Amino acid sequence: MDGAFNLPYMTIEDWKDIAPYTIGILTTIIALKKDWIASKFEKAKQEIAVGGEVEDLESKQLGNVEKEIEIYRGLLDDLSTRHKVTMDEIQVTFDQQVFKLREEIQELRDLIESQKKYITNSNRRLKSYIDKYGEHI
């Protein structure tokens, strides 16, 4: 999963911040299409002859509108599913990065501890040398 989502400047909080705007844009698009659908319903009733039968144009338009609405619902369901999967993948990547950083921090702490011990031992040796031979400048 390393490198699958290389988002250097976007955090989960950033994604959560832009989600309402994305949903707002989608709602606006649907609302605009909804107005178009409503205008189709307001048209005067027209009849056409098809194969000897008289069909109501408005009922055909209603059927088409229902199909469009189902398509949009499917798109929204797909979008929400993709969003959830993407957020889950981002969370996994984030968790992996946090784990890796914690390991690196522990390694650095261990290095600092070993350097402190080295400095302490060096100070003891230096003090011992000064006590035995005196301080030479």
Image (cartoon, rainbow, N blue to C red):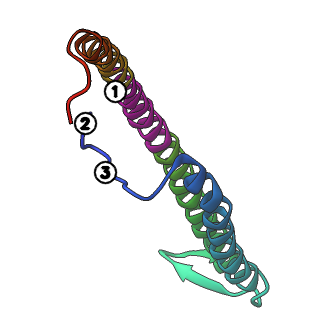
Of residues 14 and 63, the one drawn nearer to the viewer in this rendering? 14
**Left or right: 122 in relation to 78:** left
Residue wearing tag 3:
6
- The quarter holding residue 41 reads bottom right
Q: Position of residue 118 (x, y in %)?
A: 27, 16
Instruction: Calculate the distance from the C-alpha at mark 1 to the C-alpha at mark 3.
Output: 25 Å
Which residue is the extreme one toward the bottom?
A: 44
Quadrant including the C terminus: top left
Residue at left 32%, top 47%? 5
| Residue at 59%, 84% in the rendered image | 48
The local crowd at label 1, few if under 14, some if 14 to 19, many if 20 or more residues have their Cα within 10 Å, is few
According to the picture, the residue beneath numbered tag 1 turns out to be 108
Which disc, if any, is residue 71? none
Kindly check if marks 1 and 3 are in contact, taking CB atoms under 8 A apart as contact: no
Given residues 114 and 8, the one toward you in this image is 114
Residue at coordinates 64% horizontally, 58% vertically from top-left?
17
Which residue shows up at 68% across the image and 83% down it? 36
In this view, 123 is above or below 22: above
Classify 120 as above or below 68.
Answer: above
41 is within the stretch colored magenta = no
Mark 2 or 1, closer to the camera: 1
Does the magenta-highlighted stretch encompass residue 97? yes
Which range of residues does the magenta coloring cover?
Answer: 85-107
* Mark earlier in primary sequence (2, 1): 2
Q: Which residue is mark 2?
A: 2
